[in-house]
Amino acid sequence: MKCNSAILLQRTEREMVSNGALFLLLTCFSGLVYGEVAVNFNNCLQFFYRNEPPKGITGPEYRHICQLYHNAYRFATLYNSKYRTPLYSAYKLHSPDGKRPHPNWMIEPQLANSKGDKSMTYIKNPDQNVKESQAVDDDYKHSGYTRGHLNPSSHQATKDDRTATFTLTNIVPQTATSNGRDWNNFEQKMLARFKNVCKDKLYVVTGIIPYQSGKHKIKDRVYIPEYIWSAYCCNDNNVGKDQGKYFPTYAAVGRNDPNSGNDVVKKDPKKSGYDVKEMPLEELETILKKKLNMNITLFHGHCGAK
């Protein structure tokens, strides 16, 4: 909707503003209230296959974040303000051109204040409003869990893109073994497939499955995921017979608790209990439907797999 500022300004002080005119005025300037935390991903649809975010996710607790760093959008996150963790982050995978950065952990100002800074930022001593709206660095210190990236820095090309992944709105409590070995191994497999098979873009959505009991938290604030999942889509590829089942789309689910049951990912008794199971996209969506009680479609047209 376009606003005609001349018409609005021409109203004299004597005129009574009707309810309709007031609604028009609020609609015209509502963009001043919303920044990079908004009701949709319209400002960062480029991180989704065919510009279409996952469908079927509902709930008042979710916040759409177009992750802004140094005046550029880097990726997208659907954040659960109740759990103080992301449900997923979506991004385009690129080969890194340098080493892992080590910046300060950043927060999202507009989760605490809708009129706050649009860009992620570092705050040494976050106030109570920030702490109520999201996780902060102190939540993870001495918690027994690492800061697990959903969009890992190793999947981003430039230093700025890699640094932008160090926002706590992209982080979940992840066990050290999963983060440093089992899940990391899958992330490296995905990167290798991108290098070897994809001709152009590889779209990724990586998220979590919380415990259904809702009782597992760090410091009684940040909910711990029971599983971490990921799915990718690469329609433009030169896949050979040895990689055929992995394209155009494939997925995986990893255990974040060695004591979880075997209904999602079966535990190999010879391993550590943080097993990662790769699977077709359709199987992952079936798991998400059961565990999240939502009929989720991750990629437009199932990335051409059906």
Image (spheres, rainbow, N blue to C red):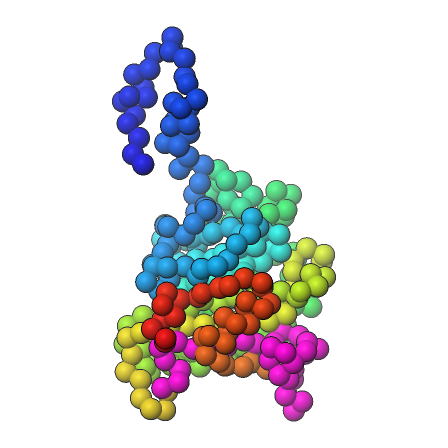
Q: Position of residue 146 (x, y in %)?
A: 61, 68
The answer to whether residue 51 is seen in the rendering is yes
Point 28% across, 82% down: residue: 238
Quadrant housing the C terminus: bottom left
Q: Position of residue 277 (x, y in %)?
A: 54, 81
The answer to whether residue 123 is seen in the rendering is no
Quadrant housing the N terminus: top left
Point 44% across, 66% down: residue: 298
| Viewer-closest of 242 and 274 | 242
Q: Position of residue 96 (x, y in %)?
A: 38, 71
- Our reading of the magenta stretch's main secondary structure is loop
Corner quadrant of residue 83: bottom right
Query: In the rendered view, does 70 fall on the left or right side of 268?
Result: left
Query: In the rendered view, does 93 fall on the left or right side of 150?
Result: left
| Viewer-closest of 217 and 233 | 233
Total labels: the figure holds 0
Q: Is residue 199 above or below residue 244?
A: above
Corner quadrant of residue 181: bottom right
Q: Say whether residue 1 is magenta.
A: no
Query: In the rendered view, does 215 fall on the left or right side of 66?
Result: right
Point 43% across, 77% down: residue: 250
| Viewer-closest of 151 and 17 | 17
Question: Where does the magenta region start and end?
Answer: 244-273
Q: Position of residue 219 (x, y in %)?
A: 71, 58
Residue furthest to the top in view is 14
Q: Say whether residue 264 is magenta.
A: yes
